[in-house]
Amino acid sequence: VSRKLFLNARIFTPKDEGKPLRGKGQGALLSFERGALLVEGGIIKEAGPEDEVLSRLSPSEVEERVDLEGRCVVPGFVDPHTHMCFVGTREEEFAMRLRGATYMEILQAGGGILSTVRAVRSSPREALLEWTRRNVRKALSMGTTTVEIKSGYGLDPETELAMLEVISRIPSELPVDVVPTFMGAHAFPPEFKDRKEAYVDLICDEMLPRVASQGIARFCDVFCENGVFDLEQTERILRRAQELGLGAKMHADEIEDMGGAKLAAKLRVKSADHLLAASEEGLRAMAEAEVVGVLLPATALSLRKPFADARRMIDLGVPVAISTDCNPGSSYCESMPLVFALSVLRMGMSPEEALVASTLNAAHAVGMASLVGSLEPGKQADFLVLDGKTPAALAYRLGSAPVRMVYKRGELVHVSD
Ligand SMILES: [Zn+2]
């Protein structure tokens, strides 16, 4: 195994304590002014002050030395909530939305999520793979080294499974870790619009067992919202998923307070996402159950809605993560640096809190924290070299993604100039 030593790095990293960081802990970082990382076979062996790491090494033990020239080094981003597997854009719909069209007008003009469902159902597998690969490659170039990707534009057993197959092929084509999530409960397909319970039966009795037996997804997610999946349907689907060994996630309380956050706490899901309208009672229950709240500020930006109140959530003790929600409708955004900047500038988070939210807490939200999310011995050497001295550069250099280099398992996988 090759041993590499990265020197002269200003390292900033969360410290993993086996669970998501919350409250005052959300902003706690370790930092080494002149730090070093020793990497063996892609795994961090040592991380700490350069002189300490060097004092424990004999020069013959290292094959390669890399001088990071005093630049800021942070863990690779973990994007814990995306719908990056799709074909076709919805730019016309976006333009209609900017002109003030309502959701119903967009739907009647053939837009909305069901237009992407039609596109994915009729797409050749190769085209779906090509679009997904392009989206993930863009995310990687801006520092995302681990990404969760949901199905949910098939809404029938064959297309949902085909999406999950495409998603699970990405790591053999690009240097990223991918967490596949089954989201058959993203919307009701047109053929079931008057038979909603029958679609929930199809998910529970056929789709989930097939997904679980193929081992092709780690999580099951449900869009719990008024007019989509109600609390009862959400609970039924997620309990079935948990019985089958899948982790559970929810899109909760995005548009109105349905009690989604409370249900998330009751089911002890890994994460409840969006939360723009979540009640204080629901947030307190999530804090108690240590459910990660995943906030999606690029979606609020694109929809021109108010941002989630991250400050209040952190103060209530909810562990907060942030994500792009990359999807063709409400947020075609692959950029974690943009999401980081919005979190700091519009959601009341400090740069330290946003770094924890985009790395370690995001890793906990997708069940990957034993491998990624912080720069500590035993984890993968997934890290970013920034144009800047501190993580605040990610919000300061607005819109330009100041990510100079991306390393995945100790290998340089992207350089920007
Ligand atoms: Zn989503």
Image (cartoon, rainbow, N blue to C red):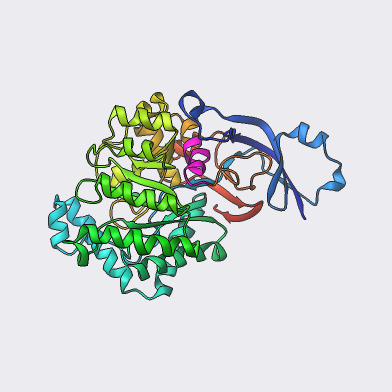
Residue 245 visible within the image: yes
Q: Is residue 61 left or right of residue 24?
A: right
Residue 334 visible within the image: no
Residue 110 position (above or below residue 56) = below
Of helix, strand and loop, which mostly describes the magenta segment?
Answer: helix
Residue 95 placed where, x, y %? Answer: 21, 56
| Segment tinted magenta in the rendering | 356-367
Whether residue 373 is in magenta: the answer is no
Residue 17 position (above or below residue 148) = above
- Point out the image quarter for the N terminus: bottom right
Q: Residue at x 64, y 52 (%)?
A: 409
Q: Quadrant of residue 49?
A: top right
In the image, 125 versus 193, the foreground residue is: 193
Q: Residue at x 80, y 52 (%)?
A: 63
Whether residue 360 is in magenta: the answer is yes
Residue 102 position (above or below residue 10) = below
Q: Is residue 229 left or right of residue 66?
A: left
Residue 50 placed where, x, y %? Answer: 74, 34
Residue 153 placed where, x, y %? Answer: 32, 62
Q: Residue at x 22, y 61 (%)?
A: 92
In the image, 198 versus 137, the foreground residue is: 198
In the image, 246 versus 271, the foreground residue is: 246
